[in-house]
Amino acid sequence: MILLDASTSSIGQTSFISIGMFLLFVGITMMITYWAAKKTKTTSEFYAAGRSITGFQNGLALAGDYMSAASFLGIAGMVALRGYDGLIYSIGFLVGWPIIMFLIAEPLRNLGKYTFADVVAFRLKQRPVRIAASIGSLSTISFYLIAQMVGAGGLISKIFALDYSIAVVIVGIVMSAYVLFGGMLATTWVQIIKAILLLSGASIIVLLTLSHFHFNPLELFSAAADQYGSEVLSPGSYISNPWDALSLGMALMLGTAGLPHILMRFYTVPDAKAARKSVFVATGFIGYFYILTFIIGFGAMVLVGKEVISAGGTDTSGNMAALMLAEATGGSAFLGFIAAVAFATILAVVAGLTLSGASTISHDLYVNVVKKGIANEAGEVKVAKTATIGLGILSIILGLLFKGQNVAFMVGLAFAIAASANFPALILSILWKKFTTRGAQISILTGTITSILLIILSPTVWKDLLGNEAAIFPLKNPALISLPLSFLAGIVTSLMYPELEAQEKFEKEKLRTYLGVGAE
Amino acid sequence: MDKNHQEILDSAEFKKLISTRWAVSLALATVMLSIYFGYLLLIAFNKPVLASMIGHNLTLAIPVGLGIIISAWLLTGVYVLWANDKYDGAVNEIKAKIRKN
């Protein structure tokens, strides 16, 4: 039942519909940015939208931050080419959300102000902890940003038949404009609009697909099994080494709770109750989205066909599967709409990353390290805006520099650092009375350094990328080693060098942690 | 730190609030961790179970996978229900005491 004729497909041709849709999106979001700019003067407005976002809105924005083009196109493609295995991968991304809810969201909201380093440093010595936390934060953001920019350039040049470099420059400029002028308020609304567009676009693809199967997903699965064998409906080769699976699972699950741009969103809501609600809403939408991508993947497998998706075996990522299915079921106008949504998705995600990087540089490094905690509002906003421009330029340069490189491993690395540097320090700081300044420093550095070192020695980089014969470290993701090591380093150091002052403050801060008394 | 705050910190009520909060959170987190890592281990060590057919061209793996997605969401819902009702109730009581004194 192949619906798409590859020879007449308009993917990769300059489409006026998709360009028109995209310009419409940029136009509307720029108007929002203009509106937001007038309301963005103070630091609380720039970093946290003046804490004016509701729990439901923040839930949508969190989902928007998390549902990248890579996950939409990548997971649908993985399902289309490898069947059930794509679902295993997406489940890993989802299960970190309940962990954020149970362990992090409320204490984070009550104790912090703008960044997660606020919480780690709350009762410890500001400067050393802020420096360490910035290292963890900025390395997570950089690797994530490189992966997003390179992916963006590649995708956009494929979808719109636009030159790679031009695509990277456009993404860099537009997203910097959102952040620079509109701060968190504009970034949040861009994220909300994009989340609604992506969720409705994906829902329409699913409805159109299921209309060929009497709106019964079971008939779709049957058709896939008839065409490609019933193996596509159960776990295949994706998990062959259980240790690999555990390590990646750990990085995805606990890394989500250590992503700076996600954690930062909890400061945009008024209180802990709204923070709680936003995780519930986000988890629901993200879960729904992964169910949609699963069906879209099978739809593409059956209605477009594996051979067409993999372009006769040359494209193993299957990134174009969702777009091909959109064209097959809804025609070229609908393809234009979905392509524009994918572009919008990329913009929104990199804007969120850039904002959190700028906050780390201005709030953690400039104010609390350089200025020792004393800086005026106007000065801090100015530094944050300068940092935004710097990061915008940097992201364009990195995007151009890594052109054509295989950077998929960098997402895994970002999650590994988030799980092994940011998460342990954050959770120990919230839960463990005896945690110390030195413990935080050592734990964050251990997590960052071992993650980066082990990924260089892993099969993905050492063997596949650098061309060595065998990898020195056997696992593809380092979290299984780096995460426990980071906890161990933090705990042992804290026990060796106790910090009585920090223990006293831990007791006193409990009214704020648990009751929200005195929260920002 | 005034005396009133110190009294709250030392009260049995406040201590119970914190210990209950973490008991609930850690229990729910353990459920999520067990479901997810149980699933991964099952895939790693016993694929045939998940590949077994439970209907015409429907494997056990599909409802299990989708069930995990739904269970993750439901667990966050359980926490919200508990926190909105029990936790916030206790917090408001303690806060009222702070204000009264």
Image (cartoon, coloured by chain):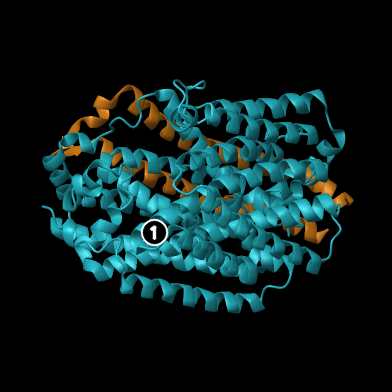
The C terminus of chain A: image quadrant: bottom right
* Image side of residue A376 versus residue A488, left or right: right
Tell me what hue chain B is rendered in.
orange
* Residue A270, image x, y percentages: 64, 63
Residue drawn at 45 percent across, 56 percent down: A153
* Residue A372, image x, y percentages: 86, 52
Q: Mark 1 lies on which chain?
A: A
* Image side of residue A502 versus residue A82, left or right: right
Which is nearer the eye, A451 or A309?
A: A309
* Image side of residue A294 versus residue B90, left or right: left
Q: What element carries label 1?
A: helix
Q: Name the residue under label 1.
A: A157
Residue drawn at 26 percent across, 31 percent down: B50
Residue A512 seen anywhere in this rendered image of the structure: yes
> In the displayed structure, would residue A410 be above or below residue A50?
above
Residue drawn at 40 percent across, 24 percent down: A242
Which is nearer the eye, A365 or A212?
A: A365
Which is nearer the eye, A215 or B27?
A: A215
Residue A206 seen anywhere in this rendered image of the structure: no
Badge 1 amino acid: Ser
Which is nearer the eye, A263 or A170?
A: A170
* Residue A160, image x, y percentages: 35, 64
Tell me what hue chain A is rendered in.
cyan
- The mark tally for this picture is 1
